[in-house]
Amino acid sequence: MPLITLRASKILSENIKSSLAESLSLITEKILRKNSKVIVVLFESSEQQGQWYVDGKIKSDPEVIFELSILVTKGTNTDEEKAEWIAQTWKLITDVLGNSSHPNYISIQEIEGKNWGYNGLTQEQRKIQST
């Protein structure tokens, strides 16, 4: 049930978004063992001046800067799986958007199963119902 959000400093074409969404879903399914039917990918992008700052200065060069985060249920993945997911996600994003001299962040945010869910049920409730 991961929610993946990619924020980028440039507007991405529909083809790029579609390709990234498919690849991010595959990486997440394979490495983090998540069900692809509930993986959601959200894109946020902006070319607005003043939107992105690095070292306290407005980013004005054409290099892309991005932040990608994923929400997962706490305790469902090992440290090794998380490290591999970050490495593979980094490779995918930089292969598609290009490498950048700016700091680009990827984070895995783990949420207790009782504190989130989808379609009206928490992840903890789903776990209890499946046993």
Image (cartoon, rainbow, N blue to C red):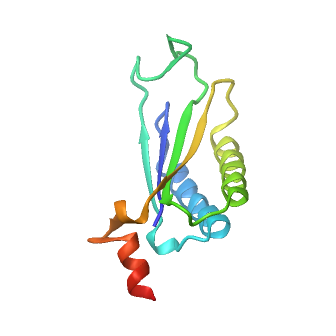
Residue 112 position (above or below residue 65): below
Q: How many marks?
A: 0
Residue displayed at 52% across by 53% down: 15
Residue displayed at 52% across by 72% down: 36
Residue 121 position (above or below residue 82): below
> Relative to residue 43, is residue 108 drawn left or right?
right
Which image quarter holds the N terminus?
bottom left
**Which quadrant of the structure image shows residue 66?**
top right
User: In this view of the protein, which residue sits in the foreground, 60 or 29?
Assistant: 29
> Relative to residue 22, is residue 88 drawn left or right?
right
Residue displayed at 58% across by 58% down: 24
Which image quarter holds the C terminus?
bottom left
> Relative to residue 31, is residue 67 drawn left or right?
left
**Which quadrant of the structure image shows residue 46?**
top left
**x and y, in percent, of residue 17 in the image:** 50, 51
**x and y, in percent, of residue 118 in the image:** 33, 68
The residue positioned farthest toward the left in the image shown: 120
Residue 88 position (above or below residue 37): above
**Which quadrant of the structure image shows residue 30?**
bottom right
User: In this view of the protein, which residue sits in the foreground, 113 or 54?
Assistant: 113
**x and y, in percent, of residue 38 in the image:** 44, 70
The residue positioned farthest toward the bottom in the image shown: 131
The residue positioned farthest toward the top in the image shown: 57
Residue displayed at 56% across by 13% down: 55
